[in-house]
């Protein structure tokens, strides 16, 4: 059975202009959610492109997702080894804008967020949850910044529900960095209801200054289909995760990709 691309609650079938967009999904040893991320890309209306951590080139992808999992078994520190993968050097260069006036949009989910901090594409670090236990639950988030490549289809202040599952999910940074993130509007998401892992200031996700790189601990790729995702505040199945992928496609179309 063929799959019909959907945009969920964001409005019917995707525009035909999106069909040419290619989003790379990187697999490291220990990655778990690459297929889920690829499915989310496909359902949003783009073409997922599998990328291997040892690849020497990015190819012609328009954006990249670093999915969740336990790259290299979290050996040494979550994301610490993956940060040195050959492909990460290419991603870091493209995302920083060193190679183009249009820096590559990159989304880091859970372990992907950890890798982004290790690669210094995002500030701060991730340590073990303050309760020292793995946690898996439906999680409400508040969208604090809807001006990034991955959040522009949300409303500022909108509350969404996605899945949270992590062991090293506590976001930490020094007070100066936290103040800068707050003052520059670079906190992208904040936990609602309670802080599930002790993250400083309830931060669930952040963005870089340019807005093309976003990292968050919860998993939007697990909230994309009615009947298979978390339950929202209204008691209905949440497809809020599609907003991330619809956002980057909207930006790519605007840039003429």
Image: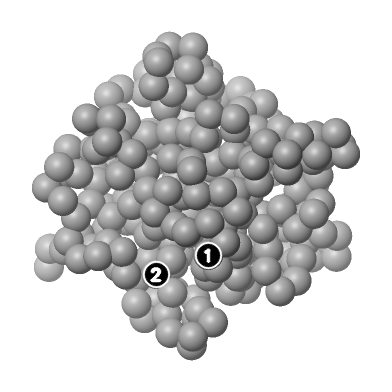
> In the visual, does 45 lie left or right of 234?
left
Residue visible at 64% across and 40% down in the picture: 186
Does 49 appear above or below 231?
above
Please tell me which residue lies in front, 151 or 224: 151
Q: Secondary structure at mark 2?
A: loop
In the rendered image, the quadrant that contains the N terminus is bottom left
CA separation, marks 1 and 2?
14 Å
Q: Which residue is mark 1?
A: 158
Q: Secondary structure at mark 1?
A: loop
Color style of the picture: one colour
- Give the percent coordinates (x, y) of residue 139: 61, 70
Please tell me which residue lies in front, 93 or 103: 103
- Give the percent coordinates (x, y) of residue 179: 80, 39
Is residue 165 among what the camera can see? yes
Q: Which residue is mark 2?
A: 239
Tag 1 and tag 2, C-beta contact below 8 Å: no
Residue 252 occupies which quadrant of the picture? top left
> In the visual, does 143 lie left or right of 169?
left
Residue 29, numbered label: none
Residue 225 occupies which quadrant of the picture? bottom left
Residue visible at 61% across and 23% down in the picture: 84
């Amino acid at each position: 059975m063929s799959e019909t691309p959907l945009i969920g609650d964001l409005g019917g079938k995707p525009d035909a202009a999106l069909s040419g967009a290619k989003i790379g999904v990187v697999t490291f040893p220990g990655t778990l959610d690459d297929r889920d991320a690829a499915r989310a890309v496909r359902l949003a209306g783009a073409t997922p492109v599998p990328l291997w951590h040892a690849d020497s080139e990015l190819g012609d992808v328009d954006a990249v997702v670093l999915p969740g999992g336990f790259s290299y078994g979290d050996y040494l520190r979550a994301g610490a080894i993956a940060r040195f993968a050959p492909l990460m050097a290419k991603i870091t260069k493209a995302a920083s804008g060193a190679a183009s006036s249009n820096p590559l949009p990159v989304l880091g989910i859970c372990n992907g967020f950890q890798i982004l901090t290790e690669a210094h594409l995002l500030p701060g670090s991730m340590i073990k949850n303050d309760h020292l236990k793995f946690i898996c639950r439906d999680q409400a988030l508040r969208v604090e910044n809807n001006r990034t490549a991955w959040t522009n289809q949300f409303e500022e202040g909108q509350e969404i529900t996605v899945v949270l599952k992590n062991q090293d999910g506590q976001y930490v940074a020094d007070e100066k960095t936290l103040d800068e993130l707050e003052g520059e509007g670079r906190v992208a998401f904040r936990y609602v209801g309670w802080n599930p892992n002790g993250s400083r200031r309830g931060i669930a996700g952040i963005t870089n200054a340019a807005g093309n790189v976003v990292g968050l601990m919860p998993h939007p790729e697990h909230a994309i289909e009615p009947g298979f995702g978390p339950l929202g505040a209204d008691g209905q199945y949440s497809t809020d995760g599609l907003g991330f992928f619809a956002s980057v496609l909207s930006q790519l179309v605007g840039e003429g990709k």
